[in-house]
Image: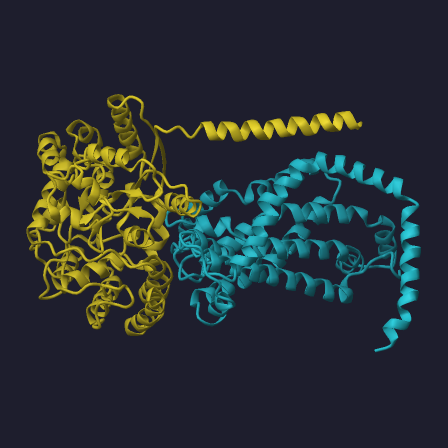
Chain colours: A cyan, B yellow
Amino acid sequence: MSEPIATLPVSKRVDEAASEAASQPKRRSRGFKQNNAVGYLFISPWLIGFLLFSFIPIAISLYLAFTNYDLLSGGEWTGLRNFERMFTQDIRYGRSMIATFKYVLLVVPLRLMFALAVAMLLNTKRRGVYWFRAAYYIPSIIGASVAVAVMWRQLFGPQGVINAIAQLLGFDPINWLGNPDTAIWTLVILAVWQFGSPMLIFLAGLRQIPSELYEAASIDGATSWQRFYRVTLPLLTPIIFFNLIMQIIANFRVFTQAFIVTAGGPLDTTLFYTLYLYRRAFNDFQMGYASAMAWVLLLIIGFFTALSFRLSRYWVFYETKEG
Amino acid sequence: MSRRHFKFVLLALTFILIFSLGSAVLAQDATEMRLVWWGSQSRHDRTIAVVEMYEAENPGLDIVYEFANFNDYWTLMNTQAAGGELACVMQQDYAYLSEWARRGLLAPLDPFIEQGLLDTSTIDDTYLEGGRVDGQLYGMNLGSNSQSIILDLDAFEQAGMDLPDPQWTWDDFEQVATELHDKLGIYAYGSPDLGDDQIWTAMMVSLGVNPFNDAGTDFGYTDDQPIIDHFNRLLRLQEAGVIQSYEEIQAAASTGPENSPIVTAEAAMQYQWSNQVVAIFSAAGENRHFKLWPMPRPEGARSANYLKPSMFFSIPEACEMKEEAAKFISFFVNDLEANEILFAERGVPVSSGVREHLQPMLDEVGAETFDFLERVAADASPIFPPNPPGYNDIRNNVWIPLFKEPVLYEQIPVEEGMAIFRSEAQAILAGNE
C-alpha cells in the first residue's frame, strides 16, 4: 500500500524528463504531421473508398453476425445463436463444408502438380516456347469468368461435346452434371485447367535454379528423376509454399464456377461455402446468419494458412538460412 | 505542396461535395413517382409503353421505372426496404405479400377504393381475395393464373388415346403416362419435376386443408400420407422410364423453355403455370397442338386447381404520393387501351370489362389460356392464405435439398425424407411465434 506513494516522486521525475525530451523536436514533429496530411489527402480517394466500402461494412458484418438481421427488420441481438445453428442444426451447412473441403483437397494438389509439370515443359529453349507460355496462361485469365463457366456447362451437358466424344468411342453418355458422383469433378477439371498463374510463378522459380547444380548432378551420374527430386524440388520449395498458400486461400472462396455450372447441385455435392453463404444472404435474406458464416470462413482460411506456415518449417528450404 | 495549394485543394473538394449534395436534393422532384417490376423483356416493353401512355395523359407526372429479373428484383427490393427507399408502386408476389404487409412495409389499398381512386367495380371479389392479408387488401391482383398440365394433342392422337378426364386423379395420371410411354416409346412426362413444392401445396388445397395454420407457426395438416404416396408414384414412374428421372431433369434444368422436353417432342406432358405457357407454345411452333389441362388430384379429393394472382401491384408505406400511385394502379388494371398493350402478359386480367374487350383479339395461346382459366374456375378450390414468413427458407433449404432431392435421387426412403422435412420445417415455422 505504501509503495506507490514512495515511487511517486520518481515517476514524476520521469514524466518531466519525458516532456522535456518531447518538447525539443516539437517543430519537426509538426512539420511531419502537415506532410502526412497532404499525403493522406492524396490517398484519400482510396482511403475513403476503403473505409466506406470495405472497413465499415466488414465491421458491421461482424456485428450482424450476432443478430438475426434480414434486411426488412432491424435485427435483434441473438448472441451466439447463429453459430450454434450453423454447427448443430443446419444440415446443409455440413454438406457445404464437405463439398468445400473435398474441392480444396482435390484442386490444390492437382492444380499445383499440373502447373509444375507444365512449367517444367515450358522451361526449355525450344522454338515457339513463348507462344506456348502465352497459350497456356490464357485459360487462367478467362478461367473464372462467367463465359467459361457457361461453356463448361455446355461441354458437360447431356448433349455436350464430352458425351459426343464418349459416344464416338463407344461409351454410354454420362450425365456429368446431374449425377452426384461426377458433378464435382467437372468443377475440379475446370479448376485444374486454370493452372496458369501458379505455372508462371513456378516458371520464374525454375529459371532461378543455377544450371551448375544440374551439371554437377549429371556429372555425378544422376538420372533425370534424381535431378528433379534432389535438385529441382528442394530449391523450389519456397515457390511451392507460396503457391500452396495462395491456392488454399483462393480455392476456399470458389464461387462462380459452382454458381453457374452446377448451381450447387446435385444433392448439394457442389454447394460450396461461398455459394451457400450467397444463397442465405441474397435468396433467403438471412443477412445475420450469412455474416456469421462469412466470419467462420475467415477463421477457417486463417487456420489453414497458419497451419501451412507452421508445417512449412519441416519441408521448405531457404538457401539463405543454413545452406 | 505549399500551404496555399493545400487550401485550394481543400476548397475545391468542399465545393464538389456541396454541389453533389445539392444536385441530389434538387433531383427529389415532387411529381416524380417510382415504379418497379420484375419480368421478361416482353413485359418490360409492354409496361414501359403503358407508362408512357399514362404520362402523356397526366402531364406533370414523371414515372421513373426500374425492372429486373425475379431473383435480382427481390434482392433489390429487400435492399431498398432496408434503406427505406421503396418505390411508390411495386410489383409484389404471393410468396412475399403477407410478410411485407405484416411488417408494415405496405399500405392497405381499401381507403383508396373507398375514395374512388382505385376502381374495382368490374373486378369480382374472388380475384381480390388473394391480395388480402388479415382482412385488408395489400395487393392489387394484376392477372390470375392456375397450374396446368400441358398435353401434346399430337402425341395422344398418335397413341390412339382419348384425352383424360379433366377431373383426373394422380392414379389416372400414372395410367395415362404409362400407356403413352408404352405406345410411343417417349417420356410421357419431362420437366419440370413433379416434386415441385407448389404441387404439394395444391395437393393440400384439394384435400381441403391449408398447407399452414393461420398463425403460420406450424403445418395446417397432420397427415403426410398423400405426399408420401405422390413421391412413391414419382419413383415408380421414373424407375420404369415413363417420366424423365430427376437426374436427367437436373442436367437439363437451365436450358430454358425453348428446349423443354415437350417442345422437343421428347415428352408428351408438362407441368406449367398458365401465364408461363406462351413461351412454350410459341417455341413449339404452329404445327404442334397443345392443350392446357387441370392438375391431377388425389383420389376422392376436390379440384387441385385454385386461381392464383400471378402478381400484384402494392403501394409501399414509405411512398409520399399514395393517391397518385393508386390512380396509376387503377389505370393499369382497368384501362382498355392500356390492356391492349399489356395483353394479359401478367395473367388473365381481373377486370371483366378488360377480359371481354380482349377476347376477340386473342391469338391461339391467349384464347387457350383464357379458356383454360374459365374451365378451371368452374370448380376451382379456394386459394389458401398467403405463405407465412419463412416459406422461402422452407422451400430453398428444406423441401428441395433435404426432402425432394434425396428422395428422387433414391438416397433415402420417402417416409424418412418426409419426417426430416416435417421436423426441419416446423423448426423454421416456430420462429413465427
Classify A310 as above or below B7: below
- Could you tell me which residue is drawn at 28 percent across and 21 percent down? B59
Using the image as rendered, state which of residue B281 and residue A132 is in the foreground. Answer: B281
- Could you tell me which residue is drawn at 28 percent across and 54 percent down? B98
Q: Left or right of B369: which side holds B60?
A: right
Q: Is residue B277 visible?
A: no
Horizontal and vertical percent position of residue B173: 14, 59
Quadrant housing the N terminus of chain A = bottom right
- Could you tell me which residue is drawn at 27 percent across and 59 percent down? B197
**Which residue reaches farthest bottom?**
A1
Horizontal and vertical percent position of residue A5: 87, 72
Q: Left or right of B164: which side holds A84?
A: right
Q: Indicate the quadrant where residue A11 lies.
A: bottom right
Q: Left or right of A102: which side holds A282?
A: left
Quadrant housing the C terminus of chain A = bottom right
Horizontal and vertical percent position of residue A68: 45, 60
Using the image as rendered, state which of residue B419 and residue B125 is in the foreground. Answer: B125
Q: Indicate the quadrant where residue A141 lies.
A: top right
Q: Can residue B67 be seen in this view?
A: yes
Using the image as rendered, state which of residue B35 and residue A311 is in the foreground. Answer: B35
Q: Left or right of A124: which side holds B282?
A: left
